[in-house]
Amino acid sequence: MTSYPLTRLRRTRATAWSRALHREVLVTPADLIWPLFVAEGTGVEDPIGALPGVSRWSVDGIVARAKEAVALGIPCLALFPYTQPERRSADGGEALNPDNLMCRATRAIKDACGDAIGVLTDVALDPYTSHGQDGLIDGEGYVLNDATVEVLVGQSLNQAAAGADIIAPSDMMDGRIGAIRQALEDAGHINVQIMSYAAKYASAFYGPFRDAVGSRGLLKGDKKTYQMDPGNAEEALREVEMDLAEGADTVMVKPGLPYLDIAVRVKEAFGVPVFAYQVSGEYAMIEAAVAAGAADRDAMVLETLLSFKRAGCSGVLTYHAAHAARLLNG
Ligand code: PBG
């Protein structure tokens, strides 16, 4: 055992060059996935009240953000649509429309940027349903599993046909990864990846996101019959194990900071690429602290991102992606 005073752990901390030399993990722009909200129209920038500093952009604006991301060294975007109310329905059929907002935005990014950036598309029905749930519901409002999976397969094929590089199911239905993987293989999309929202919790941190996609006011009740109970960790490992067995390439833990323990355990148990989603409520908490004069935004953003890397994550979905990349690029 090392002991004081022959060992002084402060020795390597004494100067900036030494701290730099001994830093165990780093964050780079290449660790970041930037979630963007797509709106109908042209030339539209629609600020989201619950997410100060974040806007919905029409497709042309999304393409501009994609070019900005390429310039900043951000390798991937995650897209979410704000679906017009008249296009929402009980069965979320708009998710299958080859010309829906997601598909148009995906095609436009791929036309403009090609393989200079990846496009991750969210698979779940909540931006398209009139009831705000992620799947089809029965008379009691219960979200049906197998019937929903069939629609999610169609949604995934629709997104892949539009050029999506990573299909990211966030719905938490059982068996959807296997069904989607098989359908992608059969359709020849063998190199389209699946990033499973494998351990996604029924969290209080999603509020601002639901405003951003316009589902907050529609949602009755909660998502506890499909998203995980925040008290469970062992179950997260079972979720991850099943999704990997069904063909997920990478897995996600969501939310981020309150569930860092889950990220660590998943990484240790499976050794696969793990991503964390620093969700809307986490972003809003940082911005609220900054607005209250209680914290330094830049330091907080970089410290939280570093914590995900320290926990073993390959990358982080964060609404601060562009800001963080600017900071990291100096
Ligand atoms: C829905 C979905 C949600 C988020 C990503 N996909 C919200 C939910 O499950 O209600 C949340 C992301 C965030 O809060 O930033 N399928």
Image: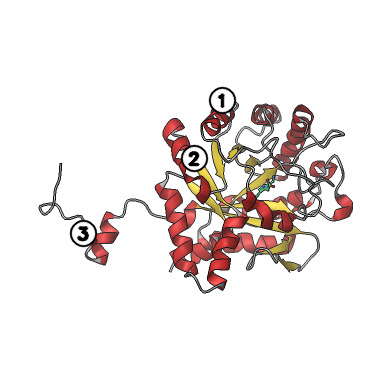
Task: Give the residue pinned by disc 1.
Answer: 245
Q: Quadrant of residue 51?
A: bottom right
Task: Give the residue pinned by disc 3.
Answer: 10
Classify 10 Å Cα crowding around label 2: few (below 14), some (14-19), many (20 and above).
many
Q: Is residue 111 visible?
A: no
Where does the image place residue 91, in percent across and percent down from the top left? 85, 39
How far apart are labels 1 and 3 at the CA level?
45 Å
Q: Earlier in the sequence, mark 2 or mark 3?
A: 3
Q: Residue at x 82, y 36 (%)?
A: 137
Where does the image place residue 319, in percent across and percent down from the top left? 59, 59
SS assignment at label 3: loop
Foreground: disc 1 or disc 2: 2
Classify 10 Å Cα crowding around label 3: few (below 14), some (14-19), many (20 and above).
few
Q: Earlier in the sequence, mark 1 or mark 2?
A: 1
Where does the image place residue 253, in percent across and percent down from the top left? 55, 42
Foreground: disc 1 or disc 3: 3
